[in-house]
Image: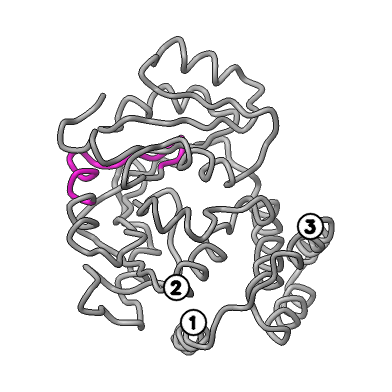
């Protein structure tokens, strides 16, 4: 399960909830030590993985903390780099080692977003075309197009940078957790880049949330992130847009309300330079 090229400097962190069968298939594919953080599954995930894959470090949580589970996993990992995977994704053979080599060669790089191939037919995830065409260009000290966001299940992070800005938090949770972390990394001077020379395979689990439920959850995260990191006019714009868009979006605002006080306690608007990058992205069709 481990590879000599990656075992010394990469750990794979997987967060999951109630996906026992998928994990028993995907976890053996990882070519590095694995930390599985289980978000209080009710299907016996932790015990099943411990029995079938004793080499996997299992951290079984008492409650569902969403993407903060990844932060717990990164804290447990002792390696310079951490690759994230979901219960239905894994890195292509040899690409954990390749990604680590890219990270070592680019010291400012905090997040490497890999190419994502979807399903047995290996379709390129449409988002990858957007990442590859990032209007932020390719700075000399990054290995690919610069990003101000990423796809959490398909990235390798520099542990130092990730923990420096607090990792994924307890407020935003999941989904849509990437935005706040990306903003904080950019504000701290770290770089993020898309690198299509390495690949993550994603075979979406059939047991997924209904689209409307997921959409409302994303708008919940969008509002909380705006409260934490965006200027007041942007917060107002998010609220108005949600109110005008549809029922799922409005439900997302309602779902955010219990966490608004916590978001405001963590409020720290991003600096002007990051706002300038956001304006470049917003101006791109």
From the image, tell me which residue sits under label 2: 186
Image: magenta residue range: 85-99
The first of marks 1 and 2 along the sequence is 2
Which badge, 3 or 2, comes first in the chain's sequence? Answer: 2
Which quarter of the figure is the N terminus placed in?
top left
**Mark 3 lies on residue:** 259
Secondary structure under tag 2 reads helix
For this view, does 128 lie left or right of residue 103? right
Q: Where residue 171 sits: x, y (%)?
A: 69, 55
State the separation of the CA atoms marked 1 and 2.
7 Å
Q: Is residue 83 left or right of residue 228?
A: left
Numbered disc in front, either 3 or 2? 2
* Residue underneath mark 1: 274
Sooner in the amino-acid sequence: mark 1 or mark 3: 3
Residue in the picture at 52% in, 32% down = 37
Q: Residues within 10 Å of mark 3 (few under 14, many from 20)?
A: some
User: Residue 221, image x and y in percent?
Assistant: 66, 61
């Amino acid at each position: 399960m481990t590879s000599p090229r990656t075992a010394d400097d990469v750990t794979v962190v997987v967060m999951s909830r109630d996906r026992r069968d998928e994990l028993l298939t995907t976890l053996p594919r990882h070519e590095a030590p694995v930390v599985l953080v289980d978000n209080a599954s009710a299907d016996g995930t932790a015990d099943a993985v411990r029995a079938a894959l004793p080499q996997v470090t299992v951290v079984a949580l008492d409650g569902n903390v969403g993407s903060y589970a990844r932060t717990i996993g990164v804290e447990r990992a002792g390696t310079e780099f951490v690759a994230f995977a979901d219960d239905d994704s894994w890195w292509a053979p040899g690409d954990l080692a390749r990604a680590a080599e890219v990270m070592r060669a680019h010291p400012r790089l905090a997040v490497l977003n890999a190419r994502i191939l979807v399903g047995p037919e290996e379709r390129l995830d449409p988002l990858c075309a957007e990442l590859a065409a990032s209007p932020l260009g390719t700075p000399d000290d990054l290995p690919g197009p610069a990003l101000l966001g990423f796809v959490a299940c398909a990235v390798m992070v520099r542990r130092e940078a990730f923990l420096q800005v607090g990792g994924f938090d307890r407020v935003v949770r999941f989904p849509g957790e990437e935005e706040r972390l990306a903003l904080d990394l950019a504000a701290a001077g770290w770089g993020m880049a898309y690198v299509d020379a390495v690949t993550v395979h994603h075979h979406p689990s059939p047991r997924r949330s209904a689209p409307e439920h997921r959409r409302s959850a994303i708008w919940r995260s969008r509002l909380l992130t705006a409260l934490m990191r965006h200027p007041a006019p942007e917060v107002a714009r998010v609220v108005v847009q949600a109110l005008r868009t549809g029922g799922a979006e409005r439900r997302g605002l309602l779902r955010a309300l219990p966490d608004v006080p916590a978001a405001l306690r963590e409020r720290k608007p991003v600096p002007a330079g990051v706002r300038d990058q956001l304006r470049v992205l917003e101006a791109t069709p």
